[in-house]
Image: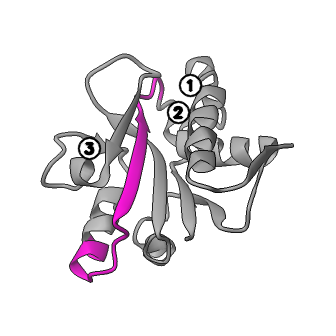
Amino acid sequence: MKTLIFGAGNLLLSDEGFGVHFVKYLQEHYVFSDDVELYDGGTLGIMVTHWLEEADRVFLVDVIEAQGEPGEIFRYEKDDFMLSRLPVKLSPHQIGIQEVLTLSELRGRCPERITLFGVIPESYEAGVELSPNLAGKLPGLAEMLVEELTAAGHVVSRQ
């Protein structure tokens, strides 16, 4: 079973790049078995459809616009965040993850198991670093995801 960890975001707008920073954090701190793939999806939108469609299990990490405090992390399953069910818009990419997944769904190629970890950003100011608040969320989210991967039978070790 191929599991994809997909980080989305724009690295030039501080916290908007949270998903990409998360993938980089995982690459620097963990080693994953060959059945787990880390992917920096950036702001590629529709260009990444094939990455999502080739996976059996997908974990998405992105910023979201939702009620709550900056740095608050929400977990949604596929049925929760597809366009018709979640009143929360993911980050302002030109074509967002929700639209890409809807296209995959229409084509009959969308993975059944998709989890979104969405974090509320603190800043969209120009800059390549996360705000201290969101940077501090990387280790905890990584540990949570690693525990879930390990429980599912994937081999993960610290570097």
Tag on residue 89?
3
Q: Of tags 2 and 1, which is closer to the observer?
A: 1
- Please report whichever mark, 3 or 1, sits nearer to the chain's N-terminal start: 3
- Mark 2 is on which residue type? Asp
Q: Is residue 127 visible?
A: no
In the rendered view, tell whether residue 78 sits above or below residue 112. Answer: above
Type of amino acid under label 1: Leu
Q: CA distance from mark 2 to mark 1?
A: 7 Å
- From the image, tell me which residue sits under label 1: 134
Q: Earlier in the sequence, mark 2 or mark 1?
A: 2
In magenta, the rendered stretch is 103-123
Residue at 34% of width from left, 62% of height from top? 95
Q: Is residue 158 above or below residue 93?
A: above
Q: Quadrant of residue 5?
A: bottom right
The residue shown at (63%, 47%) is 150
Label 2 crowding class (10 Å Cα cut-off): few <14, some 14-19, many 20+?
many
Asked if the magenta segment contains residue 159, the reply would be no
Residue hosting label 2: 15
Task: Tell me the SS state at disc 2.
Answer: helix
